[in-house]
Amino acid sequence: MSDNNNHNQDEKEVNQPSAKFKRRSKGTSSKNKTAVITGGIMAVGSLLPLLPVQTAYASAIIPAALSVSASYAAAGESVTITVDTTGSDVHLNADSSVRETTYVVVSSPDDSQTISVKLTETDPNSGVFTGSLKLVDVGTVIDSNDLNRTEIRVQNNNQVTVVDSDTHSPTLNPIARTITRKDHVTGTVTLDKNYAVVGETVTITVNDADLITTTPNKTLDVNVASATYAPGIAVTLTEAGNTGVFTGTFTITSGASSAGAIQAVTNLEQVTVTYTDAYKADNTANATSTATMQRKDKKTGVISYERLNVNGQEVIEVSLDDTDLDVNPAVQDSGIVIVSSVDDVAGLTLTLTETGPTTGVFTGRFKPVTTATNESVTPMELKVAAFDNNMFVNYFDTSKANGSAGNVAITLANLQVPAITSITAAEAGASENGAGAGDTLTIAFDIATNQTINTSNVLSKLTLPAERSLGTAPSVSWTGNQTLVVYLDTNAVLYKGDAIAIDQSAGLKNAAGTSAVSEASHSIDEGSFGTNLLGITASDANYNSSTYRHSGQSFDIVFNAPTNKVGGDLATFNKLSTISGHTLGTDGSAEWQNSTTLRVTLGTEATVVVGDTVIYDTTSDSLSDYSRETVAPASLQNVIGG
């Protein structure tokens, strides 16, 4: 048999889908052969080297072997194409001193051009020819005139076809192989639980579609390591059919690591499962994915509580410490307790929420009330008819430390939070308007207290209105454990009607110190600091002139003590006048700047001048001292100063 014809360097388009492709090589001669052309290249618009002519033979011929290095390839990956003539009668290796070439034809349903890929002999006399092909996205820009193209467009999951026209095949049919584009995915490894006790089985699942092949029920190994045994153990996973999903199991042991068992000697010790992914979605090779869990020994739940003061009423915050309920480290899990009382045996179901994703501590609140139990409000209300009646919190622990199930319960009493019943002011020093040094405040509570307020902390433990003070160095004494007396000092500023509150930091509770902290507040509602009659100390002009003649000019009436007025209050303008008969004009105003200063703004055609005596008829404005203990005189007057 003779060699193939020499490679024809001319180019030609052929539009024959059923064409049989011909092998080409260079360095061979066919001058003495009778050739019959049986086909051409199939592809519309392709520019390819013409295939050599087919030589007719009368006897059966052994064909060359065509193979591809991978039946599946991701976009961007190269596939090696091989034609092996060493076991055939195809003599492409015509010259044992030259590395010769041949071509295969590659087509894709997603590429308008069929390409001819050149294969080169691996060695001058090997008879084995190889070349590379790369699958690329359909949107990839490729030079259509490039005769040396090795890239072909194809969509994911579609096939490209590689054809070698074996001129020595007895049927004269081309040999074809297919390559399916299958882009890589990033494999995942997951565990069926986040925590496991010693001896408990943990299931590993690896899901990697890259591992779907023609062979089902494959196996792969993952590494399972712990803080105690860092090298880890190999655990074999088995595929479910041909799904790319592999599962296997291991257990936690407190002893030495062995096949299928990883040693973790401490509670909450972390165990890490590592899967080495041959290719991630971005084609990164041999990247690792991990999943973690912890050894967590069973724990008997522990219930505790804290008494809170919410608007003067006791609210109970229940805490449950049970790491068994921390089933998902990514979220705040929940638990349930039953809260009841001697007055409502059925009680209510209280849901507790984990304080953080992995704390294993769960909290929830309820409020004791004398009315019916109500689960529809926040916090839920539990009927407790009287103070000191018992309440119960019950938790059913499905797995205690010893593995058994059972109730965990606590009992607590409904306790009264100290509240203020009255605050009495008393004048004990020099007479002044409002409080002064030596005056006293007597604060009466409704129950006995733990007497935490004293002389050294009273300034920080009693909260006063703005601009009020107990004086420089007040002192206190307790009459029994239910009545607090505060002795005011120099520079005290306080009036009847002012509100006094117990600061939470005082830690004032019932006598036993077991109730919620009191934050009681009450106004000074009894007694008196003593008051002086209100009077005007000055009437200061706000205009530097001896006369008032223009609308908008003003003067301030200043009182000798705070009044019952606040900034923004309006006085009755037509109740202001002058002794001289000069007028304040029309459409003027009188507005309180604060509790001691009234600003009078003149209206049009005002005739008042500096030196006039202004008269204020207070009856229409119900003017009194700040604490409203003493009504101001019906008429107050003062000379307007310049």
Image (spheres, rainbow, N blue to C red):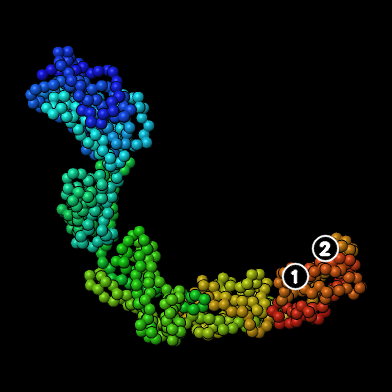
Counting the numbered discs, the total is: 2
* Residue under the point 53% across and 81% down: 419
Could you tell me which secondary element the residue under label 1 belongs to?
strand
Image coordinates of residue 40 in percent, x first then y, are: 24, 25
- Residue 319 has which mark? none
- Residue 552 has which mark? 2
The quadrant in which the N terminus is found is top left
* Amino acid tagged 1: Trp
Could you tell me which secondary element the residue under label 2 belongs to?
loop
Residue 233 in sight: no
Image coordinates of residue 628 in percent, x first then y, are: 71, 80
Residue in the foreground of this view, choosing between 369 and 8: 8
* Amino acid tagged 2: Gly
Please state if 489 lies on the left or on the right of 111 as rendered: right
For label 1, count other residues whose C-alpha is less than 10 Å away and answer few (under 14), some (14-19) or many (20+). some
Please state if 257 lies on the left or on the right of 330 as rendered: left
Q: Quadrant of residue 529?
A: bottom right
Residue 202 in sight: yes
Q: Residue furthest left?
A: 59
Image coordinates of residue 102 in percent, x first then y, are: 21, 23
Image coordinates of residue 86 in percent, x first then y, are: 12, 25
Residue in the foreground of this view, choosing between 120 and 141: 141
> Mark 2 against mark 1, which lies toward the viewer?
2
Residue that mark 1 sits on: 592
